[in-house]
Amino acid sequence: MDGPQDHHRNQERLIGDLRQIIENAEELLKNTDHQTSMLYQAARIKLAQALLNANEELERFEDAQLLRMIEATRAANEEFMDATGEAKIMRAFR
């Protein structure tokens, strides 16, 4: 059974994998730009659309991850009653 740490690592891996796929797809589009055959052009159009969808999904993942981090920080600040930035930093190094 996956715990919260495993879930977090899986999400990080998914985001990293998605970034790599996007980077590879962008490189492929760039390197096939000179191809003029209808087959290449049709494939490039499909890849461009998939790339657009992947970028949108990555943005949603990153936004959700950021919101989780903000909420976790807020909850920790509340739990430990950190009133100052110094208190927050000192707790981070404990």
Image: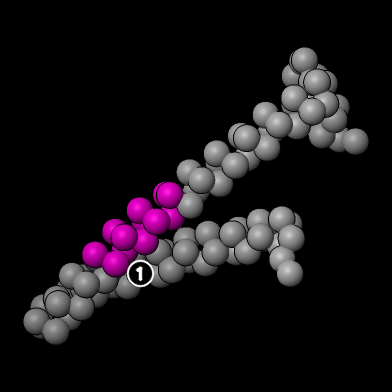
Residue name at image x 42 percent, y 49 percent: 59
Where is residue 76? Give x, y as percent: 75, 32
Residue name at image x 63 percent, y 64 percent: 10
69 or 35, nearer to the observer: 69
Q: Mark 1 points at which residue?
A: 25
Q: Is residue 90 left or right of residue 85?
A: right
Compared to 46, does 39 lie above or below? Answer: below
**Amino acid bearing label 1:** Ala
Residue name at image x 14 percent, y 76 percent: 41
Q: Say which quadrant the C terminus sits in.
A: top right
Is 63 within the magenta?
no
Could you tell me which secondary element the residue under label 1 belongs to?
Answer: helix
Is 57 within the magenta?
yes
The boundaries of the magenta stretch are 49-60
63 or 29, nearer to the observer: 63
Residue at the outermost front position: 1
Quadrant hosting residue 48:
bottom left
Q: In this view, does 6 lie to the left or right of 46?
A: right
Where is residue 53? Give x, y as percent: 31, 60
Where is residue 38? Give x, y as percent: 9, 81
3 or 11, nearer to the observer: 3
Residue name at image x 85 percent, y 30 percent: 91
